[in-house]
Image (cartoon, rainbow, N blue to C red):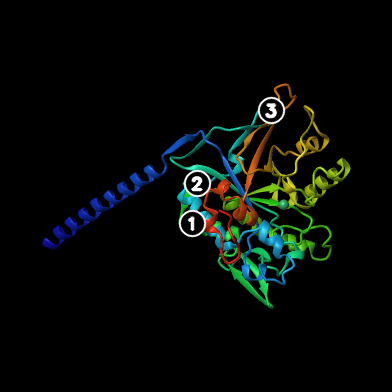
């Protein structure tokens, strides 16, 4: 009888402790989930695929060395940048959550709600192709799923496959958000900007790869599925990475057809168009130009350029224009801006602190 009483008392104590613990956890969750309307700027940074192997990328005999030094950052620089962004209260948001459509189907900015104190940030990544011309020169070869089904990278180095979960922005952001869930609003990760001229994500899925195309398509499907499940979004960065001002209307129309035939079946439709080289053409006076009309007919709603100052608004400025187009500039994070534009990047991170001094000399 004495024992039963003892067990009863112990059980009651355990129950009370559990209720207390649950309540404590619940309170913490409520605190973490306090949301507020965000009235500031929506920030948008972009970079390219990372230099996973900087010792190869910056090697004197590497023919891509200068291009990599200017246009790319290393994986370690990227990790430092994420740490700084997190410390400065930025949190990733899905670009598709920042706008809605009006009754005419045009994109309009949406009221944003964010966890209290957070600043919404879109991070986009251009040219996620792993172009065959750049193979073995310092980047990874492709995005894969590792043996645990997690997003990782594969690279052949001196005949051996190197599988890594810390060599490219995709697995790096995956682990960073796992460690800091409040760095992501609603589970958002990054925006992957694709072309199609040499396939996507390291898979040769294009029409020109006649013999291997279909097996490559089957291989990339589960990667795309996983990316979407994990909060990644896609944008069109054209098919052939042309200069918009130099390409004819006819060639532009062909480009869009190739995108629709070779990339859309893999990733689905996207409403986001990211101009190659940040070079855009929207209006001819106050009227939409032909190339923009084609983009509009193909379902693109939000258009992204390149500019060091934040801009998310409507073009053109003139009040008498027939139509307004929602446009967003992206702040460039690459070797050139790390080195030369420290001041413009300071709201996000200090390039002097994040840059790899072994490879770069930062102008302060
Ligand atoms: Zn590009």
Q: For disc 1, does the CB lie below 8 Å from ligand 1?
A: no
- Dot 2 and dot 3 residues touching (CB under 8 Å): no
Query: Where does residue 298 sit, x and y in percent of width and height?
Result: 77, 39
- At a point 63% along the width and 63% down the height, the residue shown is 51
Instruction: Find residue 90 and name its label.
Output: 2
| Residue that protrudes farthest toward the front in the picture | 364
Q: CA distance from mark 1 to mark 3?
A: 42 Å
* Left or right, 6 with reference to 132: left
Q: Is residue 108 visible?
A: yes
- Mark 2 surroundings within 10 Å by alpha-carbon count, few (fewer than 14), some (14 through 19), many (20 or more): many
Question: Can residue 151 be spotted in the picture?
Answer: no
Labels 2 and 3: the sequence-earlier one: 2
The picture places residue 299, in percent across and down from the top left corner, at 73, 38
Label 2: which secondary element: strand
124 in relation to 284, above or below: below
Mark 3 — residue? 317
Q: Secondary structure at mark 1?
A: helix
**Viewer-nearest residue: 262 or 301:** 301
- Locate residue 204: give its quadrant: bottom right
Q: Is residue 253 left or right of residue 202?
A: right
Identified at 68% across, 78% down, the residue is 158
Kindly indicate the quadrant of the structure image that contains residue 115.
Answer: top left
Residue at image location 50% in from the left, 46% down from the top: 90
Q: Label 1, on which residue?
A: 178
Q: CA distance from mark 1 to mark 2?
A: 16 Å
Query: Vertical placement of 105 versus 32: above or below?
Result: above
Task: Tell us which disc is closer to us: 1 or 3.
Answer: 3
Q: Nearer the viewer, mark 2 or mark 3?
A: 3
């Amino acid at each position: 009888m004495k024992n039963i009483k003892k067990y009863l008392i112990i059980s009651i104590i355990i129950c009370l402790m559990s209720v207390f613990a649950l309540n404590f956890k619940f309170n913490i969750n409520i605190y973490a989930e306090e949301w507020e309307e965000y009235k500031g700027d929506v920030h948008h940074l972009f970079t390219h695929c990372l230099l996973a192997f900087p010792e190869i990328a910056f090697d004197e005999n590497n023919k891509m060395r200068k291009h990599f030094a200017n246009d790319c950052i290393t994986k370690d620089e990227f990790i430092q940048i994420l740490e700084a962004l997190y410390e400065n209260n930025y949190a990733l948001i899905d670009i598709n959550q920042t706008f809605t459509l009006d009754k005419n189907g045009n994109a309009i900015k949406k009221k944003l709600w964010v966890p209290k104190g957070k600043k919404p940030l879109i991070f986009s990544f251009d040219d996620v192709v792993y172009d065959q011309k750049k193979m073995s020169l310092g980047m990874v070869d492709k995005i894969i799923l590792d043996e645990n089904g997690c997003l990782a990278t594969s690279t052949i180095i001196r005949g051996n496959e190197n599988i890594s979960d810390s060599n490219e922005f995709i697995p790096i952001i995956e682990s960073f958000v796992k460690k800091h869930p409040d760095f992501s609003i609603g589970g958002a990760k990054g925006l992957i900007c694709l072309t199609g001229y040499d396939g996507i994500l390291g898979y040769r899925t294009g029409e020109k790869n006649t013999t291997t195309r279909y097996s490559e398509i089957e291989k990339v499907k589960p990667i795309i599925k996983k990316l979407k499940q994990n909060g990644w979004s896609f944008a069109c960065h054209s098919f052939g990475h042309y200069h918009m001002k130099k390409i004819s209307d006819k060639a532009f129309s062909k480009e869009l057809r190739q995108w629709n035939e070779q990339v859309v079946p893999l990733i689905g439709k996207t409403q986001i168009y990211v101009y190659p080289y940040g070079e855009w053409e929207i209006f001819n006076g106050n009227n939409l130009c032909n190339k923009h009309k084609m983009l509009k007919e193909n379902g693109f709603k939000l258009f992204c350029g390149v500019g060091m100052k934040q801009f998310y608004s409507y073009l053109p400025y003139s009040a008498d224009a027939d139509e307004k187009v929602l446009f967003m500039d992206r702040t460039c994070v690459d070797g050139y801006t790390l080195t030369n534009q420290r001041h413009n990047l300071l709201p996000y991170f200090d390039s002097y602190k994040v840059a790899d001094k072994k490879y770069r000399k930062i102008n302060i």
